Every structure is written in structure tokens, then in C-alpha cells.
Image: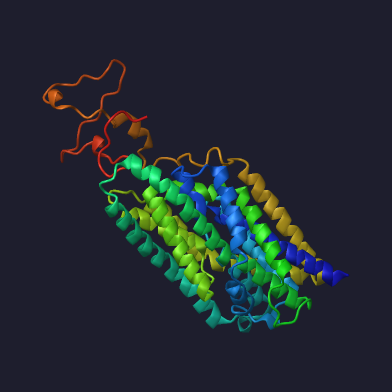
Amino acid sequence: MTEPLLLAVVVATALAFDFTNGFHDTGNAMATSIATRALKPKAAVILSASLNMAGAFLSLTVAATIATGIVDSGVVTLAVVLAGLAGGIVWNLITWLFGLPSSSSHALIGGVVGAVLAAAGTEGVLWSGLTSKVLIPALVAPVVAILVGTIATWLVARITRDVPQDTNDKAFRWGQIGSASLVSLAHGTNDAQKSMGIILLALIAGGAVPADSGVPFWVIVSCALAMALGTYMGGWRVIRTLGKGLVELESRQGMAAETSSAAVILLSSHFGYSLSTTHVATGSILGSGVGMKGASVRWSVAGRMFAAWLITVPSAAIVGAVFYWIDTVIGGVAGSYTVFGLLIVIAFLIYLWSRRKPINSKNVNDNLGPRTGLRGVHRRVRLRAPSRGDEGQAQAPEKGAEAPPPPAAGGGGPDRERGSRGGGPRTGDYS
């Protein structure tokens, strides 16, 4: 009974990865809708979880890519699969802890590739498949998403430029519900498949199914449920970074970004490309900032994300290789159980660390901090625009009030600063 028990442990670990994938990637679909308040946070994650689960049943192309297109299934053992999954889970949890929307897909692939390299050397990796199905899409997808998001946002802004802002907000918030739902459905067609492919690898390695077997139905159902449950948990740290950290979004931008993400993800799923939905969603959000005149993009935050993307595959590969090394040093089934135990301990420690500064549905829309170092200034310097009758008259500040700083030499001044929704100076008291 030892081998079936080990197989059950590996399958459970794969489902645990699917769970982390769910809460790590919820922001890809729902961050913009939550940030613009088109959906309440809890309603958003329930909707996303339901559609993620439905999307898992729509396509198995990506699952086949993961199971047969990246590593040689002939050198894969249960110990290799377990170490690879552990590498992916640990990297997912670390990036979630710091609120970095890195790729769960690349964490999983990196972990498995690292474990295979440790077990069988370079011959165990199908480099052509890894390059064409993973690495090239990883470079191309965010660029395509930025371009599509920019064009979509520019078109939407141009078409609606004469529509009052309140009308735009109300109409596009309804549109965001539809576009966010489409992203969740697309996410299920792509990301849920990856754990299915890993479980199929484990079943083949354990001798439970033949090498040419398709994905069993119970695997599809299990992965769909695990991802839906993880999505329901929220992943609020990543949601806040995507929704509040990159671009100050309005509803038009949110709908354009979500629609762009869904289009790119669904197209990649059709061709079996195991791209990162995180890369696509982040690229679309950045594109929505580039395409909206006067919008502010926090490129410093984007730079930290790009750096995390670059190191995801090699970092997860190193963790996967270390776990496999631990397994071989201890030896036998005891080594695999030790890896599983270490994974539980590490996950628990990361969870305890996260409780020091918890983020949940109640504070997910709080600002990350100073927008550009000016958040505290906004309340102080946005003053009532002077009327014509006020021109030429000195405006004394109220008693106890702080006088506004003088305008810059170029005639600008703080009250020229763009408002949080529109493209020009904002008048009226800021509250």
C-alpha cells in the first residue's frame, strides 16, 4: 500500500497547488472590477470562482501541453512530481505574501523542470517544447496584452469622450461585470488545465494509467473544485496590487483591460499555449493606463513585477531541485514524505507571517501608500477654482487653515494636478 499512498499524497499536493493558483490569480479577473467598485469584493470572488470552475471543463489542450510537451514523461517519477509541485507552491506563497502578481503557471513549470534537471539532467527536459510553448509566450503575451489594452482603451475613451463622467461610470460598471466574468471563464480554460496535466504525469509515473492516457474525469472535477475554492478565498494581497498599485482606474479602463485579457487568454488556450494569465492581465491594465489620456501609470511598481517575472522560472526550478535533493538524500518513500512535511511547515510559516499585516475584503481597496509621494498633499492643495469675480482679489486662508503653496514658475501649481477620475484639473473640495 506504500505506492498508492504516495500517489495519493502527490495528487493532494497537485490539488493544493491548484488551490494556491486560484487565490493567487483571482486578481487577474476581478482586481479592476473591485477597484472601480463595479462589484463588491465578496460578490466578485464568488462570481469568479463559479466561472473558473466552469472554464475548467471547456478545454484540455493546455493539460496535454503540460503532461507531454515540456518534460520527458519517461524520466518522471512520483518523487520528481512531488518536488516540482513543492517548488511551485513555495514560490506562489512567497510572491502572494509580498503582493506580487507573478505567474503561477511559470512557478509550476519551473518547479517541475528543476526537479527533472536534478533527477535526469538536461536530457529530461524537452527544450523545444519549453521554448515554444512557455518561454516565447511568456515574452510575447504581456507585450500583446499591453498593445491590445492600449488600443481598446483609446477607442473606448474616444467614443465616449463627450459622455458625462457619471454616465460613463454607471454604464461601464455593468460592462465590467460581463468582461470580468469572461476573464474568469478564460482563466479556467487555461490555468486549471495545468494541474490536470501534472496529475496525469503523476498517474502515469505511478502506473495508474497508461502513458497515452487522457485526463480522467475525476481529475477534471477535482482540479476545477480546488481552483474554485482557492478563488473564493480571495488572494486579496495580489488583488490590491493589481487594482490599486499600477493605474488609477476608472470603469472604462477596467472594462477595456478585462476584455483585452479575455481575448488574449482564450486565443492562447485554443492553440495550447501555457501562458501566464497574470502576465496578460497585468499587461492589459498597463495598456489601459497608456491608452487613457492623462492617466497615471506607476512604472516603479510595474518594474518590480517584471523583475519577479524574470526570476520566477529559475527560482521555482531551484526550489524544486532542492526538494528533490532532500528526497534523494533521505531516500525511499521516507524522503518523499519528508518533502511533503517540509512543504506543510513552510506554508504554515508563510501564513503566520501574512497575519502580521492582514489584507481582506474590507481593506482591499485601501491605497498601497503614497500614490507618487503626494497622497497627503492632495487634501491640502486642491482648492476651489476661483470665479471670475474673484480674479485679482487676494484670498486669505481661513483661520487655522494651511495656506496653499505658491504656483510653479511655469504657471502650473498643485491645483493643476489631475483628479483621480478625469483627465484635467479637478475643482471643488477634495474629500
Horizontal and vertical percent position of residue 425: 25, 38
For this rendering, which residue is in front, 267 or 343? 267
Where the N terminus falls, by quadrant? bottom right
| Residue lying at 52% horizontally and 70% vertically, measured from the top left | 269
When the figure is inspected, residue 211 is found, relative to residue 244, above or below; the finding is: below
| Residue lying at 17% horizontally and 27% vertically, measured from the top left | 387
| Left or right, 289 with reference to 392 | right
| Residue lying at 13% horizontally and 21% vertically, measured from the top left | 393
Can the viewer see residue 2? yes
Horizontal and vertical percent position of residue 181: 51, 55
Quarter where residue 152 is shown: bottom left
| Left or right, 22 with reference to 250 | right
Q: Residue furthest left?
A: 392
When the figure is inspected, residue 196 is found, relative to residue 259, above or below; the finding is: below
Where the C terminus falls, by quadrant? top left
When the figure is inspected, residue 108 is found, relative to residue 416, above or below; the finding is: below
Please say which color scheme the image uses. Answer: rainbow
| Left or right, 26 with reference to 384 | right
Can the viewer see residue 249? no
Q: Residue furthest top?
A: 399
| Left or right, 163 with reference to 63 | left
Q: Residue furthest right?
A: 1
Horizontal and vertical percent position of residue 143: 39, 66
Disc count in the image?
0
Quarter where residue 403 is shown: top left
When the figure is inspected, residue 46 is found, relative to residue 400, above or below; the finding is: below
Horizontal and vertical percent position of residue 232: 62, 50
For this rendering, which residue is in front, 27 or 348? 27
